[in-house]
Amino acid sequence: MPPVQDKKFLSPVRLDHEPDLVYICPMFKAVFPGSFDPPTLGHLNIIERASCLFDELVVIIAENRQKRYFFTAEERLDIMSQLIKPWKNVSTLIWDSLIVDYMKQKNIRLLVRGVRGMEDFSYEFELSMMNKALHPNIETLFMTTDPKYFVLRSTSIRELASFRGDVSAMVPPLVAEALKAKFI
Ligand code: ADP
């Protein structure tokens, strides 16, 4: 990210009503936050496509203390670390606070979220409004799911696995094994 004072990277158009707001462009880095409990082929598809759009993509494993997860944060990180190996510009980490705080700290402006349909969109839209209120410099980029993966949902996959259903077409083999191990 170029330093703020480097004028050539600042947006040439400035609106007077927000004199303190500095938009820095271009945006090379993005984050893709989520529970990933567990990661599915739908998540991986978004990661793959986003990794081609940005120089660097950070997959943030959200650890919200108010939420109960099936896989621990360390398990989700371990799984994700193995899954992202093919992409050299993708990294992952656990974050247990506001995503916008991470972005602010690292000077990252772009937040990627996947959208499977209208239901996802209305939730994601509200979330993006909240993030914008917290940190106006952040832009949320909605990426529509690939039609092949639009029915994939971590919750339903966990449920299916709990009944020993076949999840091999929905998650990478590593995740299928991890689910199997949990339900033995
Ligand atoms: P969260 O608990 O933050 O919603 P998830 O792990 O469920 O985290 O999802 C992370 C992001 O990935 C969300 O933006 C979600 O909409 C998106 N996502 C989940 N499943 C799919 C899918 N099959 N296709 C595209 N995007 C998806």
Image (cartoon, grey):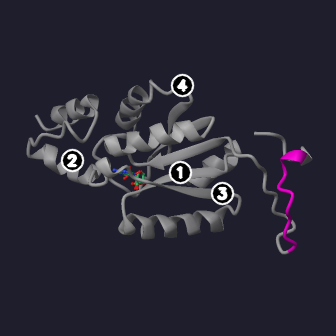
Residue 125 location, x and y as percent?
A: 50, 68
Left or right: residue 119 versus residue 23 is left
Q: In terms of sequence position, does the residue under pointer 4 or pointer 2 come before the other? A: 4
Mark earlier in primary sequence (3, 4): 4
Q: Which residues are magenta?
A: 8-16
Work out whether mark 2 precedes mark 1 in sequence or the reverse, and give the earlier one: 1
Q: Residue visible at 47% across and 64% down? A: 124
Asked if 36 appears above or below 177 in the picture, the reply is: below
Image location of residue 81, percent across then percent down? 43, 29
Say what amino acid the circle numbered 2 marks.
Answer: Arg
The residue that mark 1 highlights is 112
Disc 1 versus disc 3: distance between alpha carbons? 11 Å
Helix, strand or loop for disc 1? strand
Residue kind at label 3, given as amino acid type: Ile
Task: Classify mark 2: helix, strand or loop.
Answer: helix
Question: Badge 3 is on which residue?
Answer: 138
How far is disc 3 from disc 4 in space, using C-alphas? Answer: 24 Å
Return the residue at label 4.
88
Q: Are marks 3 and 4 in contact (CB under 8 Å)?
A: no
Q: Assign a secondary structure to mark 4.
A: loop
**Which residue is disc 2 drawn over?**
158
- Which of labels 3 and 4 is toward the front? 4
Q: Main secondary structure of the magenta part?
A: loop
Which callout, 4 or 1, points at the residue further toward the start of the chain?
4
Measure the C-alpha gap from mark 2 to mark 3.
32 Å
Q: Residues within 10 Å of mark 4 (few under 14, many from 20)?
A: few
